[in-house]
Image (cartoon, grey):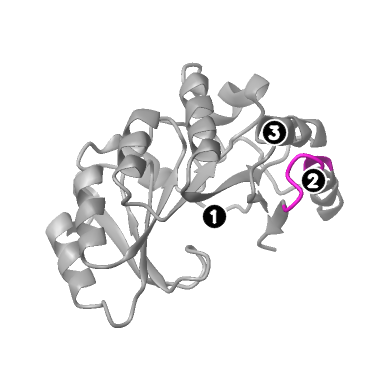
Amino acid sequence: MRFGLQKLTLLDFPGVMACTVFTCGCNFRCPFCHNASLVTGRDADMPFGADEVLTFLAGRKKMLDGVCITGGEPLLHPEMKDFIAEVKTLGYKVKLDTNGSRPDRLREILAAGHVDYVAMDIKQSQEKYPLACGSETVLDAVKESVDMLKAGPVEFEFRTTVVSPLHTPNDLEAIGRWIAGARHYYLQNFADSGDILDPDGHFSAVSRETLNEMLVRVKPFVPDAALRGK
């Protein structure tokens, strides 16, 4: 398992000074994905091995408090549980980003008590999930992960990247009904990174007016839902 490394982030882990480690590869093919090279690239292209990352972390314990683990999809890697355990042994808080498609591995990591915060992407309403994630077979797994996080003790957030023309206010209301009772839910507007998986998809940010309408439609189900980013 290979990693990319951002040595400092003040944004990715709420309230925690952290670094971010990136894993390569994803089982989703969201057409609006802004990390296409990371999703479709080869693990061998990642510059750091697990031992190198752990050595870096061992030397930063007085400067950093947490580690964000993101992708791609980190839970595709069967070694991830052991890697996270090593990070926890060093005394760090751990935030895990996931698309929710591997509830079996998520359950193991949560049961081990090795994750302090989970951020899970909700790509679309249940009815339109394949359109947004590029897979016809993952919805049951995603639903299982949603239920697991809502029922468990680990702090978590759900988040949706809102993209025109894929998302409408009705879609966001349907998502709100689905995840009702969650404490944290964030809507973040699409931004073109220049590394979009489907560059011919004509994707764009929604208007601020539409984004605010989406938030209004969500709040009856998730009262503390909020906008993130610009």
Amino acid type assigned to the residue bearing label 3 in the image? Ile
Q: Residues within 10 Å of mark 1 (few under 14, many from 20)?
A: few
Query: Which of labels 2 and 3 is toward the front?
Result: 2
Q: Looking at the image, is 32 positioned above or below residue 12? A: above
Q: Residues within 10 Å of mark 3 (few under 14, many from 20)?
A: many
Residue 197 in the image: state x and y as whole percent: 49, 39
Identify the residue shown where x is 26% and y is 77%: 61
Distance of label 2 from label 3 (alpha carbons): 11 Å
**SS under mark 3:** helix
**SS under mark 1:** loop
Q: Nearer the viewer, residue 13 or 205?
A: 13
**SS under mark 2:** loop
Q: Looking at the image, is 54 positioned above or below residue 85? A: below
- Residues shaded magenta: 217-224
Q: Between disc 2 and disc 1, whose residue precedes?
A: 1
Residue 128 in the image: state x and y as whole percent: 65, 23
Q: Residues within 10 Å of mark 2 (few under 14, many from 20)?
A: some
Residue beneath label 3, please?
A: 175
Q: Nearer the viewer, residue 81 or 187?
A: 81
Q: How many marks?
A: 3
Residue beneath label 1, please?
A: 193
Amino acid type assigned to the residue bearing label 1 in the image? Ser
